[in-house]
Image (spheres, coloured by chain):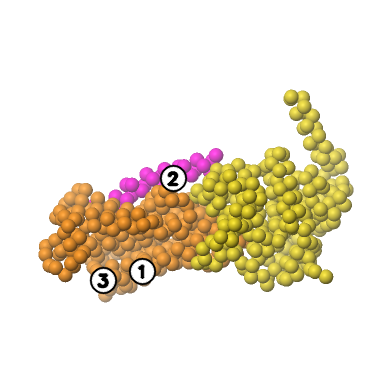
Chain colours: A orange, B yellow
Amino acid sequence: MALLFVGLLLTIVVATAFGPVRLTFADVLRTFLHPSRAGEAQAIIVGLRLPRVLAAALVGGALAATGVLFQGLFRNPLADPFVLGTSGGAALGGALGIFLIPTLSFAGFSATAVLAFCGSILTMVLVWYLARASGHLAMETLLLAGFAIGTMLNSATVVFELHEEASNSGLRVLAAWLHGEIGVPAWSQLALLAPLVAIGILLALPVAGRLNTLALGEEYAAQLGVDVARVRVAAVILGSLLTAAAVSLGGLIGFVGLLVPHFLRILIGPSHVRLIAASALGGAIFLILSDTFARTLFAPTEIPVGVFTAFLGGPAFLYLLNRRSREATQ
Amino acid sequence: MTSPLLEFRNVSFSRGSRLLLDRLSFTVEKQDMVGLLGPNGIGKTTLLRLATRLLRPESGEILLQGKPLVEWPRRGLPRCIALVPQELEVPFNFCVEEIVAQGRVPYLPLFARTTSNDRKAIDTAMDAVDILALRRRIYSELSGGERQRVKIAIGLAQQPQLMLLDEPTQHLDIGRQIELMSLLRDLNQQGLTILAAVHDLNLVTENFSSVILLTPEPSWITGPAADVMQPQLLERAFSVGQSELAQYFNAPARSELIEVQWD
């Protein structure tokens, strides 16, 4: 864990140094130590690089922690905010905020965030009841829910484009969300989201302890004196909160919540408490690196980081799906 | 007079429109080893789930140590009564020790860490069912017999007065069945009260002190094992003919004969 934490700090420094204007690590460290001193390097770091790197860290940590929560809740290693459609729900909710409350459409961060949270939580409840209707949690239900909500989101953009008063900036935000692009957020936005993500992850730790019991099955957990309904509600609320925070910064970034916990589970075992803490750090590292590659690989053109994680995560997801269905037929 | 460990008083329960249990009454005394018999779908699992408050009776009352089940605190109940389910599937690569440790959940508040007391209970439980050597093995990779032992170890880690088992010998070969029954007898002799749903009638008479036989009316017969295990009662409960039943009880003898020829 300490190793991951040091790793995260190093990653932040290294990633901040990379970009169209190549900075030295010394520049970066000097800026951290004497933030008040003016200079070209400082301006780039404080104004552009650092907010973006920190945003990537928040988004990655939030998505990976949410992945662990949802995987424990659904007892399924393939559950992830993107696969389940909660990211899509959050984006759809956020889009409604941008377009239907036009006065807040540009800097309307808070209304958007609240609606994103509602969208996320509604999606989870919907997926939950769909899955419940079929008795046990079928993989198809999870995948189709994610697919359906993703499609709704795409169609919604078309509707919003037709909407005459739709501001261009709103459309641009929505397009960025659809591809999963981490822009350069305002420091005020980070100041609001950082505590939110940190609190969400801290509150998720005790819930994660109960998810270990839930791994034996809901009925078994109930028999052992666990208040299953409360654990479920807590996991859904915290997961939705973290997803909404992630989406409002980076849009639909897929597979982070799937790849990072899966990889860490191999390294440190499946116990959810350790896993959620490690995934939060690991997810942050992973997304900072991904975003750094995404913005430097084809410089000066940037590819959205969501596209980059999809290239990595898609095949990993298919591999897991294949392995699971083979296990099921054995 | 001390109250019985577990008591069902006129308990009724239906599944859909079908009445499964009709004013069922019985008691389990401390140190008893009770076999729960009956044909498939008669409500054996339902009875066990009622006794652990996973289901609520439609009418009647269930008492544990003389206190109505509904009055037991949520985490107090699993410290007194443990249910070992028929199937346990665990996703992810949890190892045996991590799974047995879940039996301590009733003793641990949300933010508490396991104490040396908890670790001792976990080790004692694994030792009792002889799975200390498996502690680091991945549960989902274990054999049926090993899994059965892990499930019982979870129950023992709960340090209960009463252990309920749902078909503990299912999916086990004859050798593992005999091992398991002798393990349950040992636990019983060490003071654990046992109520186990069993399928294999051959295991009943020599292992259980008394029997609850659920019959299709729905009704039930309860008493010492030797009294309940009478051909005419079993024929009625399982709707089989006399000759088929006699053949069933003789079957092990015949398979022994085949084995001799093979040698």
Circle 2/circle 3 CB separation < 8 Å: no
Looking at marks 2 and 1 on the same chain, the residue that comes earlier in the sequence is marked by 1
The residue that appears at 45% across and 63% down in the rendered structure is A205
Residue that label 2 marks:
A320
Q: Is residue B82 left or right of residue B137?
A: right
- Of helix, strand and loop, which one carries label 1? helix
- Of helix, strand and loop, which one carries label 3? helix
Magenta stretch in the rendered image = A303-330
Q: Are marks 2 and 1 on the same chain?
A: yes
Label 1 sits on what residue type? Leu
Chain letter, disc 1 residue: A
Q: Are marks 3 and 1 on the same chain?
A: yes
Q: Are marks 2 and 3 on the same chain?
A: yes
Tell me if mark 2 has few (under 14), some (14-19) or many (20+) residues whose alpha carbon lies within 10 angstroms of its own.
some
Q: Please provide percent x and percent y for residue A229.
A: 54, 66
Chain letter, disc 3 residue: A
Secondary structure mostly taken by the magenta-highlighted segment of the chain: helix
The part of the image, by quadrant, that contains residue B156 is: bottom right
Q: Please provide percent x and percent y for residue A25.
A: 19, 56
Find the distance from the CA under tag 3 to the CA under tag 1.
13 Å
In reply to whether residue A307 is colored magenta, the answer given is yes
Residue that label 3 marks:
A188
Tell me if mark 3 has few (under 14), some (14-19) or many (20+) residues whose alpha carbon lies within 10 angstroms of its own.
few
Residue that label 1 marks:
A196
Q: Is residue B246 left or right of residue A66?
A: right
